[in-house]
Image (cartoon, rainbow, N blue to C red):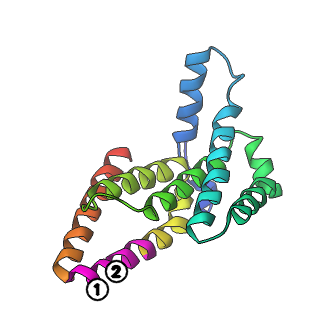
Amino acid sequence: VAQYATNYLAQAEYAPLTEYNLAVLRLLTGGDSFDGYIQLLAAVICVVGASELAGRLGLSRRGQIFAALVVATVPTFVLEVTSTTSGIFAGAVGVAALVVLTSRSSTSSWAPRGAAVGLMVGLAYTAKGTVLPLIGPMIAVLVVGGASRVWRRDGGRVALRHLASFAVAAAVVAAVIV
């Protein structure tokens, strides 16, 4: 099958992860009655993730509830949840990546966090290829911001070691997923 003759990437790209998820679910259940639950689970992740990110930005419990309600009631969000398209799934992966990047880690190494972000970037790419230009700059800003804090606190050598372990882990895991 040839690609559709267009210069608009969203029409020409094909990201198969959602279709694989639907096929596995269909094989496990023997029908298509549970196809909508992939999107529903992704919607729950988006709503809970928005509330969590609001809390990390310093909002009170009321602000977190408001953030969750705003996300849950956006009309296009509601329309996407009720279909089997890959937009909400890719959005859930992006929200999860932001939650991982803004989490406080008890480990001194950045490699586990880099592996988690690499997993999410790989999943995002295979779910919807156009999501990477949307979450990529935010991931870069958060990683560089964290590295600059480590640079000021522990020095350049430690910061570069953290960045290198993060980048290697993220690249390896993303390459395995894709």
The front one of 99 and 11 is 99
Residue farthest bottom in this picture: 152
Q: State how many labels appear.
A: 2
Which x, y percent locates residue 151?
A: 27, 82
User: Which quadrant, please, contains the N terminus?
Assistant: top right
In the rendered image, the vertical position of residue 58 relative to residue 13, given as above or below: below
In the rendered image, the vertical position of residue 159 relative to residue 27, given as above or below: below
- The magenta segment is 141-155
Residue 48 in the figure: left or right of residue 33: left
Residue under the point 77% across and 61% down: 70
Which x, y percent locates residue 18?
A: 57, 39
The answer to whether residue 7 of the structure is visible from this angle is no
Report which residue position mark 1 lands on: 152
- The quadrant holding residue 6 is bottom right
Report which residue position mark 2 lands on: 149
Please tell me whether residue 33 belongs to the stretch shown in magenta.
no
Tell me the chief SS of the magenta region. helix
Residue 1 in the figure: left or right of residue 102: right
Contact flag, marks 2 and 1 (Cβ < 8 Å): yes
Residue under the point 69% across and 61% down: 61
Of helix, strand and loop, which one carries label 1? helix
Which x, y percent locates residue 117?
A: 40, 56
